[in-house]
Image (cartoon, rainbow, N blue to C red):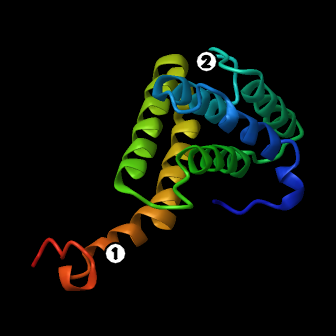
Amino acid sequence: MPYIEPSRRVGLREPVDKIVEHDQAGNPSWMGTAISRIATWSNYIPSVCPEVDEIIKVISERKEKGDNVAGDINFCISRLLVKVTKIHEEARYFKIHWINEMIKVAGLNISHWCGRGGVSALTVLDDVKMELYRRYAAPYEDKKRKPVSEGGNGDITD
């Protein structure tokens, strides 16, 4: 997960963790809407639950003070995806794929609801995707690339 100062996590960590407990958290359409709403920190995208609205309120207040909120948004979305998929406990290809799909859905929502105004939100989603790939997908792929004799699947060049 991206690093942000612990003091900046205040007001963000708890609502994100509550979203993970939400009964719709594993639903791709619901999750994509939640992520795109957080990424844009706006009311353009319909509300899905009070916890997302709480996150948007905190981010909006910080933005109004002149803070750069890209790291806060990245933290929230990354934490949400990691917690929902539990990829931090065990990296699996289907989890990596699911995260990619959620980011695609969120990107489509942002494009639909915000048009050209969503460019910075799409950039944050790219950052989230790269961070999660670096932390979870790349080590998983390295492990699977080992020779069969070492418990891997072998390299594509073998």
Q: Earlier in the sequence, mark 2 or mark 1?
A: 2
Q: Residues within 10 Å of mark 1 (few under 14, many from 20)?
A: few
Q: Residue at x 76, y 30 (%)?
A: 56
Q: Is residue 137 left or right of residue 2?
A: left
Q: Residue at x 78, y 37 (%)?
A: 15
Q: Amino acid at mark 1?
A: Asp
Q: Residue furthest left?
A: 158
Task: Assign the N terminus to one quadrant of the image.
Answer: bottom right
Q: Amino acid at mark 2?
A: Ile
| Residue 81 image label | none
Task: Assign the C terminus to one quadrant of the image.
Answer: bottom left
Res 35 quadrant in image: top right
- Across and down, in percent, residue 135 comes to 51, 66
Residue linked to disc 2: 45
Q: Is residue 63 above or below residue 148?
A: above
Q: Is residue 147 left or right of residue 52?
A: left
Q: Residues within 10 Å of mark 2 (few under 14, many from 20)?
A: some
Q: Residue at x 51, y 57 (%)?
A: 132
- Across and down, in percent, residue 49 comes to 71, 21
Q: Is residue 130 above or below residue 152?
A: above
Instruction: Give the camera-side residue of 115 and 90.
Output: 90
* Discs 2/1, front: 1
Say if mark 2 contacts mark 1, CB within 8 Å: no
Q: Residue at x 53, y 35 (%)?
A: 119
Q: Is residue 108 left or right of residue 135?
A: left
Q: Secondary structure at mark 1?
A: helix
| Residue 142 image label | 1
C-alpha separation, residue under disc 2 versus residue under disc 1: 38 Å
Q: Secondary structure at mark 2?
A: loop
- Across and down, in percent, residue 67 comes to 82, 46
